[in-house]
Image (cartoon, rainbow, N blue to C red):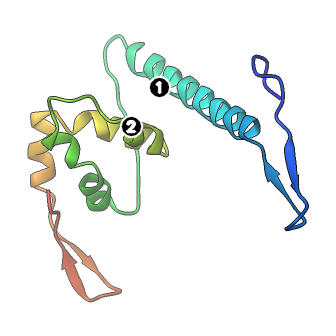
Amino acid sequence: IHPDYFFGTKLVNLEEQRWENSLVKQSISRAMIMEDLAEEMRVLYVALTRAQEKLIVTGCCNNVIGLIDKYKHIVENANEHISYSDITGGKNYLQWIIMSLMRNKVFNNACNSIPPVYDDKNGEYIYSNY
């Protein structure tokens, strides 16, 4: 149920004897996801712009090099806006922040200085392709 689009129903496929989401239900579901995403981005914006003296942002992930490599194409397309698919594919605040920082020269220099990480599973060092 959506306040603007009302509700979407499921359809019955009698031949295959199963329920399927209608186009309206799929559209409402996507609209609700996008509204939640927009609200999360507003919360992040407020958090980042309210600091008066200092802003300390912390984050953690299992594979920093992989995260940076995932968004390195943003640097290559510096004259374009960050793509819709990148933004909607961001899973958390850290990924959205990394996307924005990818075009910052200081951040780029820091990325280039990341030491290789030893992968115990494969017995080799992982270097950033950045």
Q: Residues within 10 Å of mark 1 (few under 14, many from 20)?
A: some
Quadrant occupied by the N terminus: top right
Q: Residue at x 47, y 25 (%)?
A: 44
Q: Residue at x 49, y 46 (%)?
A: 91
User: Of 70 and 115, which appears nearest the observer?
Assistant: 70
Q: Is residue 30 left or right of residue 118?
A: right
* Residue identifier under label 1: 44
24 relative to 55, above or below: below
For the residue marked with disc 2, what is the amino acid? Trp
84 relative to 63, above or below: above
User: Of 25 and 96, which appears nearest the observer?
Assistant: 25
Per the image, label 1 sits on a secondary structure element best described as helix
Q: Residue at x 26, y 89 (%)?
A: 123
Q: Are marks 2 and 1 in contact (CB under 8 Å)?
A: yes
Per the image, label 2 sits on a secondary structure element best described as helix
Q: Residues within 10 Å of mark 2 (few under 14, many from 20)?
A: some
28 relative to 117, above or below: above
* Residue identifier under label 2: 96
